[in-house]
Amino acid sequence: MSHQPTSTRSDSRDQNSALPTIRDFWDDQAATFDDDVDHGLRHDAAREAWRTRLRAWLPPAPARVLDLGCGTGSLSLLALEDGQRVRGLDLAPAMVAAARVKCAAFPDATFEVGDASAPTGAPGGAAYDVVLARHLLWTLPDPHEALRRWVALVRPGGRLALVEGRWDTRESSSPYAQGAEQLPWQGGVRAEDLVAALDPLVDRLEVHCLSGERALWGRDVEDERYAVVAVLPG
């Protein structure tokens, strides 16, 4: 009996070391990321559904938008097409490269490799009008601290537009990358938990249920999908 826990810990370490790093995992995903309807937004219905949502969530153009975990730049492109000024940030170089190609018609847009949990401020020290992130918080080691950092980058009266969900409700699941087993929101975050984390940091917020919006996802979804739009004190 005394040897079983040691063996279990050793097996866990061996399995973890065989996994890619979080950065490498998402780098590898870049080549096929846009194959999903809600990622690539190649279908008219999905693209226009997301465009309609962004127009409701973002401030009037031209606003300074920080797109965190921008991936291949699909949401950034929609914002740019509506006249917004966008800076995208993603941990994976291949994702950033794809975003630059996708948004090449907008030379003033910038896409950088970096840690979305600790982004820097806008060039020249200006504050952002909005921080935008989709399905990012579950990948972060300290989402509560990340939220505090994001709020600090937004101007008074600005906002956060966070698209999140809870798609894995199992008590434990296999990590997808090295260190992922320690992520507090692995599998997604419930709306009530995100609201509890954000409420002390903002002036007001709204939760928009997205689970029944088939056009957004390209299919019916039974898990929890939503957006939180939080406005900072003016």
Image: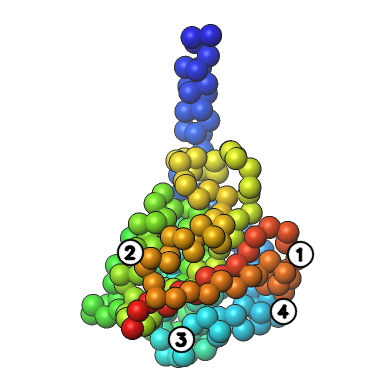
Return the disc, 2 or 3, that comes first in the chain's sequence: 3
Q: Earlier in the sequence, mark 1 or mark 2?
A: 2
Query: Amino acid type of disc 4?
Result: Ala
Provide the secondary structure element on which disc 2 rests: helix
Q: Which residue is mark 4?
A: 45
Q: Foreground: 72 or 86?
A: 86
Q: Earlier in the sequence, mark 1 or mark 3?
A: 3
Residue 185 in the image: state x and y as whole percent. Answer: 50, 50
Q: Which mark is residue 124?
A: none
Quadrant into which the C terminus falls: bottom left
Tell me the mark number nearer the camera, choosing from 1 and 4: 1
| Kind of residue sitting beneath label 2 | Arg
Q: Which mark is residue 59?
A: 3
Instruction: Answer with left or right where residue 108 lies relative to residue 16.
Output: left
Q: Nearer the viewer, residue 45 or 147?
A: 147
Q: Position of residue 229 (x, y in %)?
A: 50, 74
- Label 3 amino acid? Pro
Could you give the CA–CA distance between mark 1 and mark 2, rounded to whole angstroms?
A: 34 Å
Which residue position holds label 2?
149
